[in-house]
Image (cartoon, coloured by chain):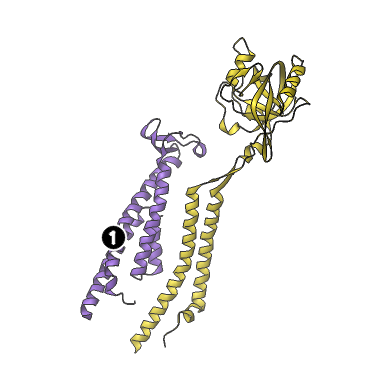
Chain colours: A yellow, B purple
Amino acid sequence: MKPSWFSIAKRPKWIAVLLAMLVVAAGFAGLAQWQLERTFNTVGIAEAELPEVPIEELVVPAQPPRQDALDRLVEFEATVDYSDLYIVSNRKQFLDPELIPGYWLIANSYLEFENQPQSLTLALGFSEDLVEMQSVANSLAGSQSESVNIIGYLEPTEAPGILDGNVVSSLSLAQLVNLYFDEPTPHLPSFVIVQQGPIPSELDRIKIDILDERVEINWLTAFYAIEWIIFALFALYFWFRLVSDERMREIEALADLD
Amino acid sequence: MPKIPASRLPQIRSTLKLFKVSSYITGIFLILLMITWGIRRLPFLGYDLWLLGPNGFITLESYGFEGSGLPLDGYNLTVIILIVHGWLYVLYLFADFRMWTLLRWSIWRFMLIALGGIVPLLSFWTEARYAKVAKQEIEEIERAASSDL
């Protein structure tokens, strides 16, 4: 009588082989899991959630801003110059999930950066209403300030816009330095959105949509993950094939006896 | 060993061709990979092979810490060789698997041939040895088929 496939598969030897193949398949599945973990990267939220660092660690004067420094929290001491106040239009306040259109109040500030005097533009606060913003700007104009501790997000400059009175349509540092200074004066390559510090009490703290998460897919590791899954399935197929071969051999041995 | 029907012969012959070609490709890419790995990781070196970068058509670029020294433009040949080898090795494994299935070889021979894509120069030896074995087996199948007539 021909031995059935199952009668061979359930012998201790072939069950041991099955267990060995399952271990191999589990190893391959583990590698697939590892590659999958590397496939989906959540980006965007990480930078903004890092703790604040001294501004000197992320900014180099007279150099283009570092990409990985943007949206990071920085800390420094600066004196706000309330004689250089401007209002920026086309701003969006992020009130999850809505974006409210409005205005920013910005001011120049002075700080000691690596023992050199530098200027740095600060975005102080948000208001939906231009009339309210103008009255805040008027009441603050020319007021004296002492050096204060500031924490805020480091942000990149924008393209120059249109100046109408004290309202600019974009936050361009190249444009602003020409409004602030008559003499050539250094300015740091980025500006800062103040989160803790001299935020006027009439204005809201600025919230921008930098906590936008997105998932990046690494296709290279995605394909490797698929590859390991196929290898794991093959490990099981090999067991099936080995048992089948054993059965063939036994059937042939029986045929030879006949 | 169970008899292999002569009707399988065309399939076996084309698989043998694939096995021989993929053995050479895998062997060559493995040597390329050892060389590029060496110039990246060996002491006093630390370069990646770079295609169409700022400094010429094919150049050596300083790898730096975890790739921090590499240029922004062009293509990293060191990484491309790694990826291409990875996929051509899968093709080689497939050829190995087909040979093993069609000629009903042992699992150990399958594994030894599979190692050819991991151990440098081994694939040249396995190709020389097992292509010869396969040819003999093909002849045996032919002989058995003609004696059956």
Q: Residues within 10 Å of mark 1 (few under 14, many from 20)?
A: few
Residue B105 to residue A129: above or below: below
Q: Please, which residue is most extreme toward the bottom here? A: A258
Quarter of the rendering occupied by the N terminus of chain A: bottom left
* Chain ID of residue with mark 1: B
Q: Position of residue B138 (x, y in %)?
A: 26, 69
What amino acid is at disc 1?
Answer: Lys
Q: Position of residue A140 (x, y in %)?
A: 76, 18
Residue A136 vs residue A34, the one in the foreground = A136
Q: Position of residue A123 (x, y in %)?
A: 68, 25
Q: Please, which residue is most extreme toward the right here? A: A201
| Disc 1, SS | helix
Quarter of the rendering occupied by the C terminus of chain A: bottom left
Residue A244 to residue A151: above or below: below
Residue B39 vs residue A210, the one in the foreground = A210
- Looking at the image, residue A195 sits to the left or right of residue B64; the answer is right
Residue B116 visible in the shown view: no
Residue where numbered disc 1 is placed: B17
Residue B112 vs residue A56, the one in the foreground = A56
- Looking at the image, residue A240 sits to the left or right of residue A132; the answer is left
Residue A159 to residue A232: above or below: above
Residue B79 vs residue A141, the one in the foreground = A141
